[in-house]
Image: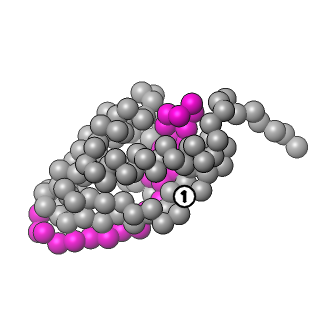
Amino acid sequence: MLILKRDDNVSNDENKAIIKNLIEELNKGNTKAYKDAIEPDCEILHWCGESINKEDFLDFINTVTVAHPDFNIAIEDMIADEDKVVVRYTESATVKGNFVGTEPNKGRFSLPAIEIYRLSKGKINGLWMA
């Protein structure tokens, strides 16, 4: 059996706490938290299936929060193993601005989603959105 040594001493619980705090900050409208948490060369696979860079992801997050000022993520499950944290959540908001071709209509939405984060030394260096 091959055992890989982790490149840091961050526990699964610490990695989960980093992601939980990041989501809590986003729920408060603090998109800067993502800028500080993500490594510059982070591998990001957007939910639409394309790879994007950190700056494009930060633009996406800003667009989401501008179009949906009450955007909220409710964590349903969080699982950590080694350098990965999986989050199953429900996102909800009111559509108050243009987003992905949707006109503002003040309607509410609620969607289930899953994200997988890869962390190294307390920073995100991989993110897969589904």
Provide the secondary structure element on which disc 1 rests. strand
Residue density around tag 1, few if under 14, some if 14–19, many if 20 or more, within 10 Å: some
Give the prevailing secondary structure in the magenta stretch.
Answer: strand
Tell me where residue 61 appears, x and y as whole percent: 29, 46
Tell me where residue 129 appears, x and y as whole percent: 44, 52
Q: Name the residue under label 1.
A: 78
Quadrant (top left, top right, bottom left, bottom right) of the C terminus: bottom left
Residue 45 visible somewhere in the drawing = no
Amino acid carrying mark 1 in the image: Met
Residue 89 picture quarter: bottom left
Residue at (44, 41) in percent of width and height: 44
In reply to whether residue 119 is colored magenta, the answer given is: yes
Tell me where residue 22 appears, x and y as whole percent: 40, 45
Q: Nearer the viewer, residue 103 or 96?
A: 96
Residue at (26, 40) in percent of width and height: 59
Magenta stretch, residue numbers: 103-129
Tell me where residue 16 appears, x and y as whole percent: 54, 49
In reply to whether residue 20 is colored magenta, the answer given is: no
Residue at (32, 49) in percent of width and height: 26
Quadrant (top left, top right, bottom left, bottom right) of the N terminus: top right
Q: Is residue 103 above or below residue 10?
A: below
Residue 95 picture quarter: bottom left
